[in-house]
Amino acid sequence: MSARPHIVLRDADREDASALIALWRECAGASRDEGSEAFTQQSLWREPGVAEAASALELSLGRPDKRIIVALVDGEIVGATVCDVSTLTPINLTRILIVTEIQVSPRFRRKSVAMTLLSAAATYGEEHNCEIVVAAIPVHSREPHRYLTKIGFNQIAVLRAIQASKLRSRLTTKATNSRDTGKLIAVRRTLRRRQGLPRNARPGRGPAVGADD
């Protein structure tokens, strides 16, 4: 068995943009081996340019309750995770730590990188008096799910995603169809009242077969 590498943790900064893009790209490529559904989730990620990634890092790191932790082996970033301090609901003060984007290079999996990152995240949560730790990971990523279940995480929610433009299109279509259906029903009711038809009859049709002459 190969010796576990020496892992160094630190906070991410703007200069890590290129290395983090490479890490995300490597993890997305490895997801192909976990099945088409897992890759579909990873494909929601669009690879940014270095300038965009640097700006996004600067934006994220400007938030006081957010922390991005990176793991390095021999100076190379091989893992990263994102920590957010929030409340359990908008109407109480129970603090929770939300851990997202647990990324570990496939070349360094099963080498305690994820455990080291989660340990740092747990310490961060304790420093902010968080009572609950929530980890959000892709539903079809089998290995992370097995690991989190093994150390005591339970499933409490389901996350679903859709492109914003597609959501707006479908909501508009649904609303339009509902309005059109409502208008059609109103027209039919008006015609029935005018023609004195029973409720189960359709306007414009002749008498049912077998009806009295």
Image: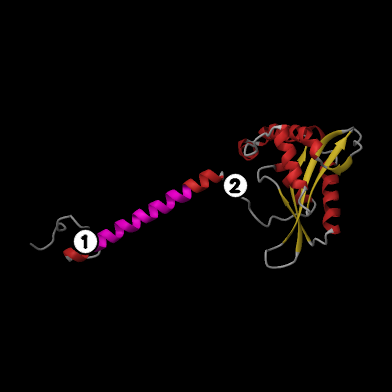
Rate crowding at label 2 as few (under 14), some (14 to 19) or many (20 or more) other CA atoms within 10 Å.
few
Q: Name the dominant secondary structure of the magenta segment.
A: helix
Residue 33 drawn in magenta: no
Q: Which residue is mark 1?
A: 191
Label 1, secondary structure: give it: helix
Residue 28, above or below 178 = above
Q: Nearer the viewer, residue 19 or 42?
A: 19
Q: How many marks?
A: 2
In the rendered structure, find residue 61 and report the number of the disc placed on it: none
Q: Position of residue 9 (x, y in %)?
A: 88, 42
Count residues near mark 1 (Cα–Cα under 10 Å), then give few for <14, some for 14-19, many for 20+: some
Determine if residue 94 is in view.
Answer: yes
Q: Position of residue 35 (x, y in %)?
A: 64, 36
Residue behind mark 2: 161
Magenta-highlighted residues: 170-190
Disc 2 residue type (three-letter): Ala
Instruction: Give residue 199's quadrant in the image.
Output: bottom left
Q: Looking at the image, what colour scheme do you see? A: secondary structure
Q: Out of 114 and 64, give the one closest to the viewer.
A: 64
* Residue drawn at (66%, 43%) of the image: 140
